[in-house]
Amino acid sequence: MGYNEEYRTALEDPAGYWAEQAKAITWFKQPDTILQKTEHDTYCWYPDGELNSCYLAVDRQIEEGRGDQVALYYDSPSSGVKEAITYSDLLQRVSTFAGALKGLGIEKGDRVVIYMPMIPEAAVAMLACARLGAVHSVVFGGFAANELAIRIDDATPKLILTASCGIEFDKKIAYKPLVDKAVELATHKPSHTVVCQRPMLTAEMNPERDLDWYEFQKGAEPAPCTPVKGSDPLYVLYTSGTTGQPKGIVRDNGGHAVALRYAFNNVYGMKAGDVWWGASDIGWVVGHSFIVYGPLMGGGSAIFYEGKPIRSPDAGAFWRVIDEYKVNSMFCAPTAYRAIRKEDPTGELSKKYDLSSLRWVFVAGEKLDSSTYQWLSDLLDVPVLDHWWQTETGWPMTSPMMGWDNPSEARLGSTNKPIPGYDIRVLDGDGTEVEANETGNICVKLPLPPGVAWSIWNQPQRYIDSYLTAFPGYYHTGDGGFKDDDGYIYITGRTDDVINVSGHRLSTGEMEEVVSAHPAVAECAVIGVADSLKGQVPVGLIVLKAGEEIEESQLESELVQRVRNEVGALACFRKAVVVERLPKTRSGKILRAILRKIAANEAYKMPSTIDDETILPEIEEILQQRGLV
């Protein structure tokens, strides 16, 4: 079947379509129920099937004869270390580590927080948890201790797995003190912290709580795979919430496995034995789906890269990796290519390498601007394919289907057509579908396909309130955009106050909380402004308390440090602008949506609810003076 037939079949008979796709993975017990409504009025796929995600990613690949094939190419220009880890080697490491975890009392349903850099041990940790049926929660290593503490209290893990340090360019970032501080701040106290000591920076150990990564594995019996239900959670991954309190997105085992196998083969066009590179970090959903689980479940060889696109050692780092490992396809956020282009505008460094193995390049995570698209397309001479998905979905919603004959062509400005299973509609504020080419709220008609998260950890009602309430019968993506006459989707931006910094979704509400705690600040609004390199960066609009005479430069410096300490360096909060007042409704709500439009240099209508119309031109003028719009 072609795209149109597949898409129609998935919409008309979702249970039948996804029952067929489920045959691509190996079940310990075949599911009798394909699609089921939950008690919270959401959905669940394959709830009574039994499987194990680690088995599918590792053991099954060996059974199919791939034991000597490389599973992970670890490449760390940051530390100068490279390693080719075969599926057989990976099985030995994972089963032994799982046995050691079992020896600490970790069992099915327990939570384990993983706070690690991009080293192979991080992938081993994830797979070992999955092997036992334990629920892992990976926290990106760039988050500050306070953010980690919030996640510890929410997930209530038995154990934390970490490393002595991460590396960013030439800088060593000590992880262990951050973990210690987080445990101190958290109400919940995990029983142990297991620390992988790296030679470039070793951590001080607390003998009462800390265990050495390799020492605690000595004598451990390799653990077999624990069967879990399709509806059992595989992991919890925290994403920014608009209230400042992160949301623990829960991913199930069954739907996730089916969706990732489907996506790896059909969306990305990869086959067993192909070399795939998801240029991201395991702290984000891309790392979960398409560095670890997806490529391994599909029998591929995945690149596990610890480094940056530039200064590793130069802006040719990506091209070197493609050449060295004969990468067939890769996925990256546009911000990485913008960074490369900034350092090497003509792409001269690419000419040093053989890039002929590359078939196509996928980009996602933020808007692909036309100049970056053109530069990359001309440089690589392969299709550059924009596509779109979210942490909540876990795999793409729109994309050309590169595993099929005659995939949809790329269309500049569009993230392509909906993938089978995603009935994407554009709705106005009342929930009525709009005409083609008309902008509105991007929503997906229920039920969503397998692999999409159906709950927030310990807060099922929050999931419903966040995604299913605004437009009954639909999943509200929070993105705005339109659909053209041919069904191509165009994303124009977020409709909430989460901004996109280098492909990372960060809550402005969270930053406002930190900024407003400064003793000189009366109130504030943090908005995203366009940035040629990072897509968006946050800017704080600050109203000072009466009588405060702090220099603006000093205030900015102090606020930057506060956000760095409380949220993390990845927030890229570097600008704070003092204003006389903020625009508000008559009921006292700050008009953030209008501020976002001003920052984006978009036309806006004066809201009928505004209490003082003269404030908006004031803000606009100040931002223009600072060169921020």
Image (cartoon, rainbow, N blue to C red):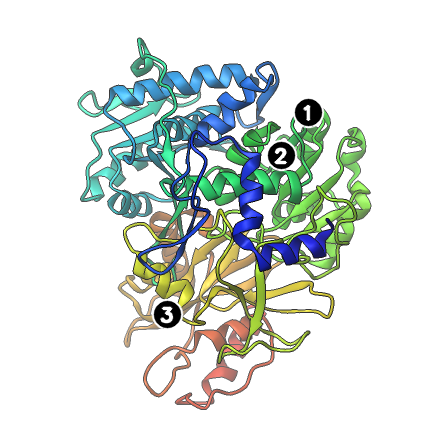
Q: Residue at x 40, y 18 (%)?
A: 95
Which mark is drawn over residue 325? Answer: 1
- Mark 1 residue element: helix
The disc labelled 1 sits on which kind of residue? Tyr
Mark 1 closeness class: few <14, some 14–19, many ≥20 residues within 10 Å = some
- Mark 3 residue element: strand
The disc labelled 3 sits on which kind of residue? Cys
Q: Is residue 86 visible?
A: no
Mark 2 closeness class: few <14, some 14–19, many ≥20 residues within 10 Å = many
Quarter of image, res 490 = bottom right
- State which tag comes first along the sequence, 2 or 1: 2
Which mark is drawn over residue 524? Answer: 3
Q: Is residue 47 above or below residue 459?
A: above
Q: Residue at x 27, y 47 (%)?
A: 154
Name the residue that disc number 2 marks.
277
Give percent across and percent down for residue 96.
38, 16
- State which tag comes first along the sequence, 2 or 3: 2
Q: Is residue 395 left or right of residue 5?
A: left
Quarter of image, res 134 = top left
Mark 3 closeness class: few <14, some 14–19, many ≥20 residues within 10 Å = many
Give percent across and percent down for residue 301.
61, 26
- State which tag comes first along the sequence, 1 or 3: 1
